Image (cartoon, rainbow, N blue to C red):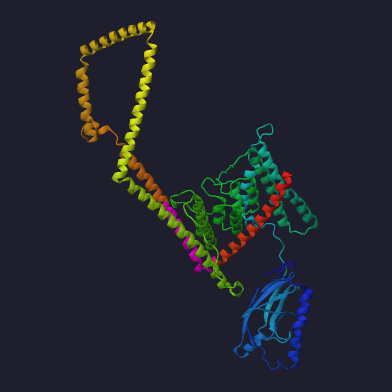
Amino acid sequence: MNIMSDAPCSIDESALATSISTVREPYLSLVADNQLSSLPEQVFNLTEVSPAWASSTEKTKVLITGYFHSDYQHLAKFNLVCVCGDVSFPVEIVQVGVYRCWVLPHSPGLVNIYLSFDGYKPISHVVNFEYRTPILHDPTASMEEKYNWNEFRLQMRLAHLLFSTDKILDIFSNTVSPNALKEASRFSFKTSFISKSWQFLMKSIDEQTTPFPQVKDSLFEIALKNKLKEWLLERIVVGSKSTEYDAQGQGVLHLCAMLGYSWAISLFSWSGLSLDFRDKFGWTALHWAAYYGMEKMVATLLSAGARPNLVTDPTPKNPGGCTAADLAYTKGYDGLAAYLSEKSLVEQFNDMSLAGNISGTLDTSSTDVVNTQELTEDQFYLKETLAAYRTAAGAAARIQAAYKEHELNLRYKAVELNTPEHQARRIVAAMKIQHAFRKYETKKSNAAAVRIQHRFRTRKIRREFLNMRRQAIKIQAAFRGFQVRRQYKKIIWSVGVLEKAILRWRLKRKGFRGLQVNSAEDGEQEDGVEEEFFRTGLKQAEERVERSVVRVQAMFRSKKAQEEYRRMKLAYSQAKMDLEFEDFLTSEVDMLTDI
């Protein structure tokens, strides 16, 4: 493994020479005591030197593995040096049987390398070590090795959404409200630091203190920040609360979450747009961040107010949808899934408390008085896992108890509705409603009759009414005669009998009243459908709660999951502190703008 000279782990040549001189003093005293003269030539069995070669122009870290012979195990506590060619280098013990040293640049070619106490007499096998000339950059290297094409495609989709979206703000329109202009000015003042970042980039380019690939990435990031600021500012002025999708169905916020651009979350939060904005498949930014295992992005979204208990749209494989914890678990991020499961249960408990379904608060404080400084790493991870499981289990128990209480109340109401006393009360109430309706209809008919009588009191209107009545009587008489002549009564009677016979045969019912619809049965069927829908949703919610508790409990069996959980807690704490600091600055900005 080659290490650049400006790497943080590299060592200075003067410091290396000083360390060599300080290390060799005890060796010389050891030689003076004639303790090395009695040793055989090989007391250390050298098994491997890794790497077997080094660049001739760079400092290189070399790992040497081997062991002392059984009769010379006590020599392991003495300081060793590695002799590479004609130069000696101090050796550090990484673990039992593994030693590390740094070799300086050397002319290309083969040299001997071995371990020694005094820098002259070898105590191990002498093996060959090669210094190679560094290979120049190959311009024909494939683009797949230099770039991450998946990340580049996401960046292209984000840039396409930001730069090619049609402007929705008309400069000639006067429909912008004063409140929108005030919010836009506040947002512009809060994000004024983005414009100042160009100065720092130009300064780093002039001083050449930043590597060239990092400068290019910084340039692209600053361009995206400025365009995203303009894009959000336009929507604040117009008052739009929704954003556009690309061809794959994702929006700007979702693409930023996929790319891990945590700086975009604060901009969306200041703009007033929802962080729980869903794409065409019902996925939020937190779902995408959990799916890709981006711990910092997940922590930033949670600290900004994203909801961890939201569910994606149902699919044939997952009829109940997936939470962010489910997506993280399917991709193998067990610690992240456990952390999101705990947050989801706590968030659901808080929502039910606000809705009045659960009374009281959830106790998430630890009752242990053990000093964490005295704990080992494994004990500290176990303590955090126990605290997480206690919180998740407490929230799940309270939520399931609320579900059972709600279901019991529904059953109690259903039984109460079927009692004879309640049915009698319903009949009496229906009779009162019918009586009131009939009385209203009677009053309305009497009023109409009074108005009719008043209009027909005059002689002219009465004469016109009598003429119309005589004409109607003549028409009725002519029609009755026509019916008698055509013997419509027999035909109507025969058709009526035929209709009854056909309906009895088709409906398999007795009598013509079989066509009547029983409204009571339809009401019971609708109630049954609603109850079945509620039962299905309740079952899916209970399954999600159980899965969350199981994932938190699974951390007891995985050291990797415990480490991921610990990293997520630290990332969330850091994101929370950054958010509080930004809120403090924004509050100061608001005070200045108000003044």
- Residue 471 inside the magenta-drawn segment: no
Q: Position of residue 18 (x, y in %)?
A: 78, 78
Q: Quadrant of residue 57?
A: bottom right
- Which picture quadrant has residue 51? bottom right
Residue situated in front as seen by the camera: 216 or 259: 259
Can I make out residue 450 in this image?
yes
Q: Is 210 on the left-hand or right-hand side of 311?
A: right
- Residue 574, image x and y in percent? 64, 60
Above or below for 512 versus 187: above
Query: Relative to residue 467, is residue 394 drawn left or right?
Result: right
Q: Is residue 150 visible?
A: no
Q: Main secondary structure of the magenta part?
A: helix
Q: In the image, is residue 592 above or below residue 61?
A: above
In the image, which residues are magenta? 538-561
Inspect the magenta stretch and tell me whether residue 554 lies in it: yes
Placement of the C terminus among the 4 image quadrants: top right
Indicate whether 47 appears above or below 471. below
Instruction: Tell me where residue 198 appears, x and y as whole percent.
Output: 75, 50
The quarter of the picture where residue 579 lies is bottom right
What residue sits 24% from the left and 12% below the top? 480
Residue 266 in the image: state x and y as whole percent. Answer: 65, 51
Q: Which is nearer the eye, 51 or 428?
A: 428
Question: What residue is shown at x 75% (from left), y 90% (from top)?
Answer: 29
Number of numbered markers: 0
Q: Quadrant of the N terminus?
A: bottom right
